[in-house]
Amino acid sequence: MKLCRFGNNQLGLVEGTQIRDVSAALDVLPSHRYPLPGHDPLIAHLGELMARIDAIKEQAPTVPLAGAQLLSPVANPGKIIAAPVNYVKHLQEVLDDPNLHHEMRINHIQRAGLFLKAPSSLVGADAGIALRKLDRRNDHEVELAVVIGKQGNNIRREDALDYVAGYCIGLDITIRGPEERSLRKSPDSYTVLGPWLVTADELPDASSLDLELSVNGETRQQANTSDLILGVAELIEFASSFYTLHPGDVIITGTPEGVGPLVPGDVMKASIEGIGSMQVNVRAA
């Protein structure tokens, strides 16, 4: 299934050029009182939700996909885990360009490890990106995003894909400079997730997907997930050796070469094979 959040926090099933409004299926989710859970309840109960969607979808009202306000398909991730320099050519790109490394020591991912982005940085495709620190470079990075479906800790790579709820396109926007990555990559709107969640049963193999990003019609990044240094299963193993993963946690898997600056007024288009594409507008904060 392709599941989206749109409009006024409605739940949609994407079918071609239409969205079936299956918000009625949300009734299967448990209600919560304070303290709220530290995970995303929709993702935690995705199996029950999908069964309910199947039962009601034929009677669900439809709206055109074009013009629908698409929100982040994951509403409440406990963690956004990001993988730096996880493509060989991007690692060399960063090492070769002082505008990217700012005299900081750059290591391959096995030594650099992972980093966290603030969940408050998360938006959907139609919210767009509001750039800060316009006196500095703000760069785009397109990435495959993995949404965790169930709790796990010290997960073996052989079992890792069993913990995946689905996949999205991710945009990791970064302010260049000497500060820690998490600070420069966590302003509001600097993590874009969309356009929808493709459930894992529909995309069982994410190991060889073409991905592309263009700015104002000019292709900037183009690669395949087969070029990842650590693939999806290895990243889940790596991340879960440090953190307990919870439903709704998001792992963005790293960006290929071709990162470049954004300015207000730019229009990005990001695409990943098997998922789809999304347009994201850039403005000043």
Image (cartoon, grey):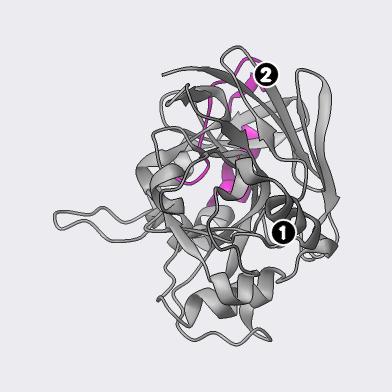
Q: Residue at x 52, y 39 (%)?
A: 176
Position of 167 relative to 124 (above/below): below
Q: Could you say where residue 169 lies in the image, as x and y percent from the top left?
A: 66, 44
Ranked by sequence position, the earlier of labels 2 and 1 is 1
Q: Residue at x 45, y 83 (%)?
A: 153
- Which mark is on residue 91? 1
At numbered mark 2, what does the secondary structure look like: helix, strand or loop? strand
Residue situated in front as seen by the camera: 96 or 126 = 96
- Bounds of the magenta span? 52-75
Label 1 crowd bin: few (<14), some (14–19), many (20+), radius 10 Å:
some
At numbered mark 1, what does the secondary structure look like: helix, strand or loop? helix
Kind of residue indicated by mark 2: Val
Position of 142 relative to 234 (above/below): above
Q: Residue at x 44, y 71 (%)?
A: 245
Position of 176 relative to 209 (above/below): above
Q: Could you say where residue 102 lies in the image, as x and y percent from the top left?
A: 55, 48
Q: Could you say where residue 280 lies in the image, as x and y percent from the top left?
A: 62, 25
Q: Residue at x 41, y 75 (%)?
A: 243
**Residue at the farthest left position:** 34
Q: Answer left or right for 221 relative to 127.
A: right
Q: CA distance from mark 2 to mark 1?
A: 26 Å
Residue situated in front as seen by the camera: 92 or 115 = 92
Q: Which residue is identified by label 2? A: 267
Q: Could you say where residue 115 lies in the image, as x and y percent from the top left?
A: 47, 62
Residue 91 position by quadrant = bottom right
Residue 54 forms part of the magenta stretch: yes
